[in-house]
C-alpha cells in the first residue's frame, strides 16, 4: 500500500515537472520575430542599392601594450574560430593559408574547440597567449565572454584581429565585417519577396536564438520587412543548432504544419539552408516553396542546379580569412593605424573602414545557377 | 552499479511477458494519445505525410536503439554510439564519393561498426574495465579522430545510387521504415527464441547464475557489442543516406536520444529484462514529441527536459512496479 | 554495469600507495618532457593560470570521488553546472534578486538538483547511472527551457573577483578549490563519514547490516555533488563574465577521467582525494602541455580518451596482480 502511494506520488511529481516545463514553454509570446536580438536595428532604404556608408565614427578598437616592432619581419599567427571541423571555418582557414603564402613572411595555424563553446575557446586563446604568438585571429562564440582573454592578449603585446563574429570593440584592434547585418537582411528579405510575392507567409530555420550573428540578422530582417515588405507574413522561427538532420526534420515539420500557408523558408546557417532545400525537395514542393538562405556553394549546388533554390546569399568565407590575414599583416607593419579609412588587402583591393574599427569585406554575394559552378568551398 | 538491487524477473516467462506487453501497450497508447491531442489542436499533424515523415526521419534512431537495448539488457551501457555513427556515416560517404562499388559502400560501415564495438566489448568483458569508462574514452577518441582526419570537410556530390534511404520498395515502402520494422522484428524474435538471444537476458540478470547454466557471460557481452555495432552501422547508413550532404561531425546528443529510446522502451536498466519492440516504439514516441512541440508552438528548448522527464518517469514506474510485485509475492 | 565486476573489492593501502606513486612519477616525467618542448610551460604564471582553469572541474571532482567510492556515479554534474549558471543569471536579471542572493540561490538550486538525484537513488533505488543520465538531459533541458538559451551579461565589476581576481598572488578560485580539497581529504581520511563511504563501496549489504546510515550518507554525497556544481557554476560565470545555457556540458567526462585516473575504482570501495587531485592536475597539464607543444585540440581529445582507458587498464592490472599475490 505504502509502495502504491509512493508510486502515485512519484508519477504525479514527474507529471507536474513535465507540465510545468510545457506551460513555461508555451508562455513565450512574440511581438517581433523570434530569434532576433534586442539591439537597435537600422534597416536600409527599400530601393537603395548595396549598403550605404554610415556616419563616420571615431576609432573605438583597443591597442596592444608594448608590442615588439615586427614590421616586415616574419610573424606567427594563430586563428581560433568558433569551432574547428565545419565547412565554413575550413574555408576561412583556407583563405588565411592563401594569404600567408602570398605574403610570404606570415605563418598561420588554425586551432580551436571542437564544439562552439565559449569557455573552451577562451582556454585555447589563453594557451596561445602563454605559448607566445605575434597575433591572434578570432571568431567569437560570445562577444562579451571572450573580452577578458582578448584584453589579456593585448596587454601582453599581442595583436588581435577578429573576423566573422565580433567581440566588444575595445578587446581587439580591428574586426573584419563580412557584410553588414542590415545589408544581409535586405538581400535576404528582398530575394524572398521577389520569389514568393509580397503577401505570403514564410518561416525561419536558424541555429539557436542566441547565436549572435543569426540573432542580429533576424532582428534586422524583421525591421527591414516591417519597413519595406509589410505584408510578408512571418509564421515562426525554429532552432536546429548546426545539425544537419535536425535542420531537415525541423524544416519538414514546418512544411507539414503550415501546408499552403507556407510559401518560403529562410535558412540562417550554412547547415540549415541545404537541409531546408532537401526538405522542400523531399516534399515535392520545388518551385512552389522558396528557400532563401545563407549557405556555402558546394552544399547548395544540387538544389540550385535542380532549380529548387534560386538564390543563395553569402560572402566568400575564403576571402574573409584572406582579408583577416592581410589586415593583421598591415597592423603589424604599422600600415593600418587608428583613424585609417581603408586598408590594402591583396587581390581584394582596398577595403573600407566602417563603424570606427571594422573593415568591410563588401556587399553580400548572391550565388545563382549561373555562377555557382565557379566556386568550390 | 549498486550492490543491492531489487530481485530480477526471469525473462521469457509469463510474468515478464505481461510486463513487456504492458510497456509496449503503454507506449502505443501514448503515441496514439499524443497524436489525437495534437491533432485536435492542429489537424495537419495527423496528415499521413507528417506521420510518415516523423518515422522516416528518425528510423535510424530506432535501429540504433535496438543494439543499445541489447547492450543494456546485458547489464552494460554504451555512450560512444553517437560518435561511432558519425564516423561510420563519414566513412561510407567518403567511399561513395571515391567511386567504390555501392555494395561495399553499404557494407563497410557495418563491418567497421562491428569491429569497433567488438573491440570495446572485448575490453569490457575480458579486461574487466567498466563499460562506462571504455565507451566514454572511445567517445573522445572517435570524436577527436573524426575531426583530425576529415577536418570537418563536408561530403557533397554523393552519387544518387548511394541514397539507400531514398529507395522506396514497390514505390510505397520507404527503405528506412522497412529496415526499422524488419530489424525490430528479427531482433525481437532472436532475443526471445534463440539460445544466444536468451543468453543476453541471463547475463544481464545474473552473470554468476548464467555461468552455472553454461552461458559464457564474457562471450555473450562481446557478441552483444558486435551486434550493437552492426545496428549502429545500419543506423549510420540510414543517417548518411537521407540527406545530400554528410557533415563529417558527430551528431550532437545522439547517444542520449538512443539511450532514452532504449530505456523508455522498457529495457530494464537493472539488466536482464527488455524488449526491442518497446525501444522502437519509444524512438517513434520521442520523435513524435519533438514534432508535436513545433505544432503546439512550444520552444524546442524543452525537448531535453521532456526526454529526461520521460526516462525518469519510466524508470521509476518500472522499479516501483517490480517492488510492488515483489511485495505481492 | 557491475556484471563482470568481482563481487567485493577492498581498499588496499599498499596498492593505493603504489598507484599514486606511479601517477606522480608519470606526472613528473610528463612535466619534464613537456617543459623541454616549450620553456613557457613550467612557469609560475602558466601553472597558476592552469590552476584557474582547472577549478570548475576540480570542485566537481571532489564529491565525485566520494560518489564513485560508494560505487555510484553522477553523470549530471555538467548539466547541474548549466542549470545553476542559468538560475544565477535568471534570478538576478529576470526575478530581480540582489546578486549575492542570486549566487546563494544558484548554489541552493544545485543542492536541490543533487538532492533529487540522491533521493530517487536511495528511496526508489534507481541505479545511479540511469538516474543521472536522465537528469543529465532533464537539468540541461531545464536550463535551456528556462533561459530560452538567452545569455545574461553585464554583471557588476565586483562579481568578477571570484573568477578573475587574485588573492596573495594566487587566483581566487584556486583558494576555494584548495579549501575544498583539504576539507574533502580530511573528511574522507579521518572521519566516520569517510569510512562509511568505503564501507558502502566495499559491500553495501554488509554496511547496512552493521547499522551504518547508508541511505543518509548517499543522499549527502549526491547533494554535495549538486552544491559543488553550484559553486563551480558561480566560479565559471564569474570567470567568463556571461551566463549561457550550454555551460558545463561535457564536464562529466573531464571529472570522471580525473577521478578514475587518480586511482579511484569505478567499482567502488577504493580511492582517495589525493589521487583525484593528482589525476586532475595531470589532465589539466597534459592538455595545456600538449597545446603548448603544438598539438591541436582534436588530437588532445583523443589523448584524453586514450589516457582514461589506459589508466583504468593499468589500475586494474595492478589490482589483478595484487589479487593473485594475495
Image: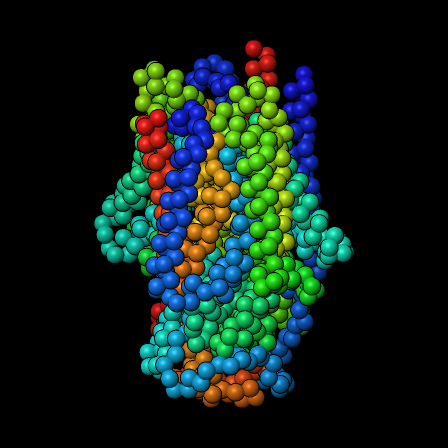
In the image shown, does A65 or A289 lie closer to the viewer?
A: A65
Question: Which quadrant does the C terminus of chain A fall into?
Answer: bottom left
Q: Tell me where residue A239 appears, x and y as whole percent.
A: 56, 55
Q: Residue at x 66, y 34 (%)?
A: A15
Residues C275 and A8: in front is: C275
| Residue A57 picture quarter | bottom right
The N terminus of chain A: image quadrant: top right
Examine the rendered structure and indicate whether residue C298 appears above or below residue A366: above
Residue located 45% across and 65% down the image = C43
- Front residue of this view, candidates A350 and C277: C277
Residue furthest to the left in view is: B101
Image coordinates for residue C31, horizontal then vertical, percent = 39, 57
In the image: residue A177, left or right of residue C223:
left
Residue B236 is situated, as x and y percent measured from the top left of the image, at 37, 45
Q: Where is residue C23 in the image (x, y as percent from the top left)?
A: 39, 46
Q: How many labels does the image show?
A: 0
**Residue A65 visible, this orientation:** yes
Task: Say whether residue A34 is left or right of residue A120.
Answer: right
Q: Which colour scheme is used?
A: rainbow
Task: Residue at 34% x, 40% y: name it.
Answer: C314
Q: Quadrant of residue C187?
A: top right
- Residue A235 visible within the image: no
In front: C18, or B126?
Answer: C18
- At x 46% / y 38%, what residue is drawn? C264
Asked if residue B120 is positioned above or below residue A4 in the image, the reply reads below
Amino acid at each position: 500500500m505504502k509502495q502504491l502511494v509512493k508510486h502515485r506520488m512519484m508519477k504525479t511529481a514527474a507529471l507536474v515537472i513535465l507540465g510545468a516545463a510545457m506551460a513555461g514553454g508555451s508562455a513565450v509570446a512574440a511581438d517581433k520575430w523570434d530569434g532576433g536580438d534586442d539591439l537597435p536595428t537600422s534597416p536600409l532604404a527599400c530601393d537603395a542599392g548595396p549598403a550605404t556608408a554610415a556616419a563616420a565614427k571615431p576609432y573605438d578598437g583597443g591597442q596592444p601594450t608594448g608590442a615588439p616592432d615586427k614590421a616586415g619581419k616574419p610573424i606567427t599567427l594563430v586563428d581560433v574560430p568558433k569551432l574547428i571541423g565545419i565547412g565554413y571555418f575550413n574555408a576561412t582557414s583556407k583563405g588565411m593559408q592563401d594569404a600567408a603564402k602570398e605574403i610570404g613572411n606570415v605563418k598561420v595555424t588554425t586551432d580551436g574547440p571542437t564544439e562552439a563553446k565559449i569557455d573552451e575557446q577562451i582556454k585555447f586563446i589563453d594557451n596561445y597567449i602563454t605559448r607566445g604568438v605575434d597575433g591572434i585571429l578570432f571568431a567569437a562564440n560570445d562577444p562579451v565572454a571572450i573580452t577578458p582573454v582578448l584584453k589579456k592578449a593585448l596587454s601582453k603585446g599581442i595583436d588581435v584581429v577578429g573576423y566573422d563574429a565580433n567581440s566588444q570593440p575595445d578587446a581587439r584592434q580591428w574586426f573584419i565585417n563580412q557584410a553588414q547585418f542590415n545589408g544581409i537582411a535586405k538581400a535576404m528579405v528582398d530575394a524572398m519577396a521577389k520569389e514568393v510575392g509580397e503577401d505570403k507567409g514564410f518561416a525561419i530555420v536558424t541555429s539557436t536564438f542566441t547565436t549572435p550573428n543569426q540573432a542580429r540578422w533576424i532582428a534586422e530582417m524583421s525591421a527591414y520587412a516591417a519597413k519595406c515588405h509589410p505584408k510578408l507574413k512571418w509564421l515562426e522561427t525554429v532552432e536546429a543548432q548546426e545539425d544537419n538532420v535536425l535542420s531537415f526534420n525541423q524544416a519538414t515539420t514546418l512544411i507539414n504544419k503550415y501546408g499552403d500557408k507556407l510559401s518560403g523558408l529562410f535558412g540562417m546557417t550554412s547547415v540549415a539552408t541545404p537541409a531546408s532545400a532537401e526538405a522542400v525537395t523531399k516534399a515535392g514542393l520545388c518551385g512552389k516553396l522558396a528557400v532563401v538562405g545563407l549557405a556555402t556553394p558546394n552544399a547548395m549546388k544540387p538544389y540550385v542546379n535542380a532549380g529548387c533554390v534560386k538564390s543563395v546569399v553569402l560572402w566568400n568565407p575564403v576571402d574573409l580569412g584572406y582579408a583577416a590575414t592581410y589586415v593583421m599583416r598591415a597592423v603589424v607593419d604599422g600600415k593600418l593605424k587608428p583613424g585609417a579609412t581603408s586598408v590594402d588587402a591583396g587581390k581584394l583591393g582596398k577595403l573600407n573602414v566602417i563603424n570606427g574599427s571594422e573593415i568591410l569585406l563588401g556587399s553580400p554575394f548572391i550565388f545563382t545557377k549561373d555562377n555557382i559552378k565557379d566556386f568550390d568551398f | 552499479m549498486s550492490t543491492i538491487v531489487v530481485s530480477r524477473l526471469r525473462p521469457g516467462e509469463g510474468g515478464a511477458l505481461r510486463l513487456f506487453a504492458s510497456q509496449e501497450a503503454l507506449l502505443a497508447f501514448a503515441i496514439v494519445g499524443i497524436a489525437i491531442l495534437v491533432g485536435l489542436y492542429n489537424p495537419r499533424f495527423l496528415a499521413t505525410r507528417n506521420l510518415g515523415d516523423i518515422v522516416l526521419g528518425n528510423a535510424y534512431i530506432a535501429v540504433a536503439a535496438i543494439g543499445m537495448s541489447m547492450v543494456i539488457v546485458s547489464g552494460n551501457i554504451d555512450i560512444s554510439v553517437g560518435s561511432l555513427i558519425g564516423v561510420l556515416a563519414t566513412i561510407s560517404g567518403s567511399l561513395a564519393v571515391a567511386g567504390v562499388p555501392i555494395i561495399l559502400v553499404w557494407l563497410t560501415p557495418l563491418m567497421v561498426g562491428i569491429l569497433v564495438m567488438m573491440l570495446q566489448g572485448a575490453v569490457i568483458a575480458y579486461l574487466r574495465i567498466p563499460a562506462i569508462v571504455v565507451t566514454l574514452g572511445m567517445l573522445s577518441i572517435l570524436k577527436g579522430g573524426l575531426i583530425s582526419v576529415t577536418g570537418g570537410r563536408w561530403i557533397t556530390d554523393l552519387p544518387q545510387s548511394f541514397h539507400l534511404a531514398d529507395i522506396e520498395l514497390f514505390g510505397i515502402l520507404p527503405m528506412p521504415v522497412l529496415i526499422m520494422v524488419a530489424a525490430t522484428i528479427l531482433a525481437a524474435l532472436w532475443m526471445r527464441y534463440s539460445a544466444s538471444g536468451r543468453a543476453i537476458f541471463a547475463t544481464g540478470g545474473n552473470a554468476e547464475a548464467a555461468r552455472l547454466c553454461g552461458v559464457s557471460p564474457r562471450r555473450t557481452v562481446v557478441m552483444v557489442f558486435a551486434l550493437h555495432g552492426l545496428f549502429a552501422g545500419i543506423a549510420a547508413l540510414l543517417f548518411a543516406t537521407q540527406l545530400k550532404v554528410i557533415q563529417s561531425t558527430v551528431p550532437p546528443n545522439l547517444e542520449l536520444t538512443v539511450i532514452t529510446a532504449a530505456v523508455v522502451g522498457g529495457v530494464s536498466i537493472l539488466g536482464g529484462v527488455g524488449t526491442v519492440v518497446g525501444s522502437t516504439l519509444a524512438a517513434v514516441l520521442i520523435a513524435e514529441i519533438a514534432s508535436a512541440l513545433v505544432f503546439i508552438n512550444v520552444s524546442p528548448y524543452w525537448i531535453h527536459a521532456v526526454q529526461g522527464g520521460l526516462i525518469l518517469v519510466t524508470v521509476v514506474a518500472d522499479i516501483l512496479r517490480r517492488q510492488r510485485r515483489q511485495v505481492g509475492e | 554495469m557491475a556484471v563482470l565486476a568481482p563481487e567485493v573489492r577492498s581498499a588496499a593501502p599498499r596498492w593505493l600507495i603504489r598507484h599514486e606513486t606511479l601517477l606522480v612519477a608519470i606526472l613528473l616525467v610528463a612535466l619534464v618532457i613537456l617543459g623541454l618542448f616549450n620553456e613557457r610551460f613550467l612557469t609560475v604564471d602558466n601553472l597558476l593560470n592552469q590552476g584557474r582553469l582547472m577549478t570548475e572541474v576540480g570542485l566537481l571532482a571532489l564529491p565525485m570521488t566520494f560518489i564513485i567510492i560508494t560505487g555510484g556515479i553522477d553523470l549530471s554534474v555538467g548539466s547541474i553546472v548549466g542549470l545553476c549558471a542559468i538560475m544565477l543569471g535568471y534570478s538576478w536579471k529576470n526575478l530581480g534578486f540582489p546578486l549575492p542572493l542570486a549566487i546563494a540561490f544558484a548554489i541552493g538550486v544545485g543542492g536541490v538538483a543533487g538532492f533529487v538525484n540522491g533521493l530517487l537513488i536511495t528511496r526508489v533505488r534507481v541505479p545511479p547511472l540511469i538516474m543521472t543520465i536522465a537528469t543529465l538531459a532533464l537539468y540541461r533541458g531545464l536550463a535551456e527551457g528556462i533561459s530560452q538559451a538567452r545569455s545574461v551579461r553585464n554583471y557588476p565589476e565586483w562579481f568578477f573577483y571570484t573568477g578573475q581576481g587574485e588573492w596573495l598572488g594566487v587566483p581566487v578560485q584556486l583558494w576555494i578549490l584548495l579549501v575544498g580539497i583539504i576539507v574533502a581529504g580530511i573528511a574522507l581520511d579521518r572521519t566516520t563519514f569517510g569510512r562509511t563511504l568505503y564501507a558502502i563501496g566495499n559491500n553495501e549489504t554488509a554496511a547496512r547490516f552493521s547499522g551504518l546510515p547508508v541511505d543518509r550518507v548517499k543522499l549527502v554525497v549526491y547533494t554535495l555533488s549538486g552544491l559543488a556544481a553550484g559553486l563551480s557554476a558561480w566560479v565559471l560565470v564569474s570567470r567568463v563574465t556571461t551566463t549561457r545555457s550550454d555551460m558545463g556540458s561535457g564536464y562529466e567526462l573531464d571529472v570522471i577521467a580525473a577521478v578514475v585516473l587518480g586511482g579511484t575504482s569505478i567499482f567502488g570501495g577504493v580511492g582517495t582525494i589525493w589521487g583525484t587531485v593528482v589525476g586532475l592536475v595531470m589532465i589539466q597539464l597534459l592538455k595545456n602541455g600538449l597545446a603548448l607543444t603544438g598539438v591541436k585540440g582534436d588530437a588532445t581529445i583523443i589523448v584524453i580518451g586514450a589516457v582514461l582507458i589506459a589508466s583504468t587498464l593499468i589500475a586494474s592490472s595492478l589490482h589483478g596482480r595484487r589479487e593473485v599475490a594475495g
